[in-house]
Amino acid sequence: MMYETVLARSFSKHEQKRLGYWAMLACLFIVLSFFTIFKPYLGPLPVYLFSLLYAEFALSTPTGFAVNLRLSMGEDDKLHLYNDTTSSWLIAREDSSLIANDTRSSQEEAEIMSKTSIVKDTDRTHEGAEVSESIMNSSSIVNGTSKSQEVPGEIASNNNFMVNNTNISLPTAADADAVTKNNKMEPLCTIMGRSDFCEMKGDIRIDGNSFTVFIVSSETDILAAKNTSWRIRPYARKGDQTAMGAVREWTLKLVAGGSYIPQCNLNHSVPGILFSAGGYSGNHFHAFTDIIVPLFSTARPYNGEVQFLITNGWSGWIAKFKTILKALSSYQIMNIDNRQDINCFGSMTVGLKRQSYKELGIDPSKSPYSIKDFRQFLRSSYSLKKTRAIKIRDGTKRRPRLLIISRKRSRAFTNVGDIVTLAKNLGYRVVVAEPDADVSGFSQIINSCDVVMGVHGAGLTNIVFLPENAVLIQVIPFGGAEWLSRTFFEEPAKDMNIRYLDYKIRVEESTLLQQYPADHVVLRDPSVIGKQGWLAFQSIYFKKQNVTIDVNRFRPTLVKALELLHQ
């Protein structure tokens, strides 16, 4: 060849050999420099890869070079050797198609070399449907790249995340076996209907100042992980765009020795749970269904040996539910936002397990607990004495106790006195009370009662404190709130072993009749207002309306409640 002729005339054989060594070293230096420059984009490379490159590197063709690249795949994957004679490097699993510059080649299968995979799936989507009463926002931002998608109705977003400008998917429960089997320190993020949560073990460091959870791992673990970064809003009402918009986003990062790793200031000997008191937490109903019930499901297995870290925390909310928080954790709750110290754990859960599509519910098929277990926990935590409602027997002088939940601002009873008189005439002992921030005090009141009645609203959430077999009478306001009433309180009450009755008021019993002409669309066809959206519906039928009960029409409902207490 021409190159050999030129070399033979210019250099001796010994010099040619030395020149070949130097050329090979120069090429190796160029390859190492390439990976060093592009390391932030390619991720850390294991030492054995450089060894393989050096061992297999050869000037085999006049127009280029061939590289035999050996890949260590997962435990159940067989190793393939791919001979690349172009400038494209091809990496594929045995179930993938291999295409590059219209050239295909394959060689015989080789033995499995390792349990470590260095292939990162760069375009994989985990999709799932979830129930939502509002438009979903599935925006996720990592490393300055965002992806936003809005999906109406009951169709959930696919849970795609962006890491280093690459589409990757959140690991799901299906990955659990592989993670455990390969002993990786990769956090396991579970996608549920109404919440996402991540559980991890190892060297976990919490930086509240940057809202980041660092998972310290090895270079090999990071290279093998599907994801190296996650974003999560630790509040259990996924699918509600408005609620989740008021929840702080946290970043979870797999980091190794070459990365920035904050040093621990405080080491905890118990596991941690990080959750948010953002969203709709100021509403009593949402505080229970979005936080308290999921927190019970998540924390109860630790039997108090767990540290709570709260984000979006505020003192009023913590004080309101201090009894429940102390019953679930033996340690003082930590407000983690903007803390300058680094808190370190050996085990951490970010987010809460909302294991039911239902409001105020726990799906026992997905949890070791049920909503009945939760109610028993509340009775124990608040030292509630009454476990079962009264059973009326013929000839007994015991009278059932009726609680009328009053409201001051909207959906209030305008004729409470008439209702009290009717109930007493039927044989009830009557209590009228309005819930406030003193959850402990109100829990004692409602637990002492056998029947509770009130207009649809957050105050009815306190049925969680009722004794078994008690009766709930939900007064449904005018305007088409039947679906909300059924979903928020009727179905949960039945799951709690509480008997349920409702009373739907007519337009004549609504104070809206005094605010609008009789032929106004608000009175004539509430569905028109409903089609304008939740805010329009709420502003009229929930915020402007009070109720004047027709006691003669309401009488049979109270009689029916007495009949249920006879059973």
Image (cartoon, rainbow, N blue to C red):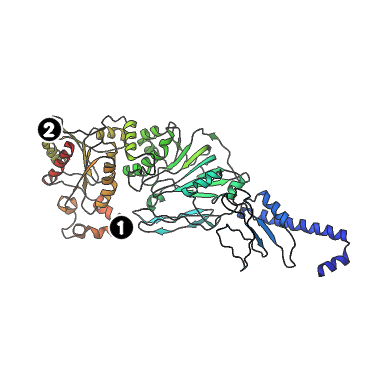
Q: What element carries label 2?
A: loop
Q: 404 or 180: nearer the eye?
A: 180
- The amino acid pointed to by label 1 is Gly
* Image disc number at residue 447: none
Q: 79 or 396: nearer the eye?
A: 79
In the picture, measured across the screen, residue 347 lies left or right of residue 558, that is right
Residue wearing tag 2: 394
- Cα distance between the residues tagged 2 and 1: 51 Å
Q: Nearer the viewer, mark 2 or mark 1?
A: 2
| Res 78 quadrant in image | bottom right
| Res 492 quadrant in image | top left
Q: Callout 2 environment at 10 Å: few (<14), some (14 to 19), or many (20+)?
A: few
Q: Do the residues labelled 2 and 1 touch (CB within 8 Å)?
A: no
| Res 552 quadrant in image | top left
In the picture, measured across the screen, residue 446 lies left or right of residue 243, that is left
Percent coordinates x, y for residue 182 in the rendering: 56, 45
Q: 85 or 229: nearer the eye?
A: 85
In the picture, measured across the screen, residue 27 lies left or right of residue 386, that is right
Q: 466 or 331: nearer the eye?
A: 466
- The amino acid pointed to by label 2 is Asp
Q: Is mark 1 on a helix, strand or loop?
A: loop
Residue wearing tag 1: 533
Relative height, residue 282 to residue 124 (above, below): above
Percent coordinates x, y for residue 516 in the rendering: 18, 56
Q: In which quarter of the image is the N terminus?
A: bottom right
- Tell me which label, 2 or 1, sits earlier in the chain: 2
Percent coordinates x, y for residue 272 in the rendering: 47, 37
Residue found 21% across the figure and 35% down from its top: 450
Percent coordinates x, y for residue 526 in the rendering: 22, 57
Let me know if residue 438 appears in the view.
Answer: no
Q: Callout 1 environment at 10 Å: few (<14), some (14 to 19), or many (20+)?
A: few
